[in-house]
Amino acid sequence: MLFEFLNYFFFFFHTFLIFFNSFGWIFPTLRKWNLTSLLITAFSWFILGIWYGLGYCFCTDWHWAVRRQLGYYDMSNSYNHFLILKLTGINFSESLVNTVAVIIFFSSLVLSLWLNIRDYKRKRN
């Protein structure tokens, strides 16, 4: 029962986090939180990734552990690939999905940094 709850929790939480990282910079009141979330994601992908593999995500790791406990072994190497496959049934190549995810991530990071700096300068003046 607990693992079923956690499975659903991770589906919703991780999906929300992906959308928030991608589009949270749009909303001025959420920009600081968006930048923080993007930096935590970058830390996971690139710093923890030194030890666990580039692109490592602790949310994905925890979700996969929950799914293994439930007897599921249908996970991809990429959470985004897994999510797209589960939600749409379309099996894009993992490399395509990862490339698009990295482009969206860095675009969002640049936009979030730029907008946060701009907002800070406007507030200061």
Image (cartoon, helix red, strand yellow):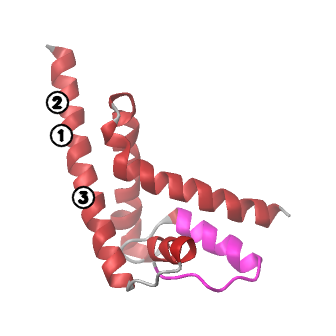
Residue 5, by quadrant, is: bottom right
Which amino acid, by three-letter code, is at mark 1? Trp
Instruction: Check whether the beta carbons of the residues at disc 1 and disc 2 lie within 8 A of each other.
Output: yes
Q: In this view, does 35 lie above or below 16?
A: above
SS type, badge 1: helix
Q: Which of 111 and 60 is in front in this view?
A: 111
Seen as rendered, the residue at the extreme top is 125
For the residues labelled 1 and 2, the Cα–Cα distance comes to 6 Å
SS type, badge 3: helix
State yes or no: residue 79 in magenta: no
- The residue sitting at 26% across, 43% down in the picture is 112
Q: How many labels does the image show?
A: 3
Q: Which of 42 and 84 is in front in this view?
A: 84
The residue that label 3 is drawn on is: 106
- The residue sitting at 21% across, 25% down in the picture is 120
Magenta part of the chain: 59-77
Q: In this view, does 55 lie to the left or right of 15?
A: left
Q: In this view, does 26 lie above or below 11?
A: above
Q: In this view, does 58 lie to the left or right of 117?
A: right
**Dot label at residue 118:** 2
**Dot label at residue 114:** 1
SS type, badge 2: helix
Question: Residue 79: x and y, percent?
Answer: 49, 72
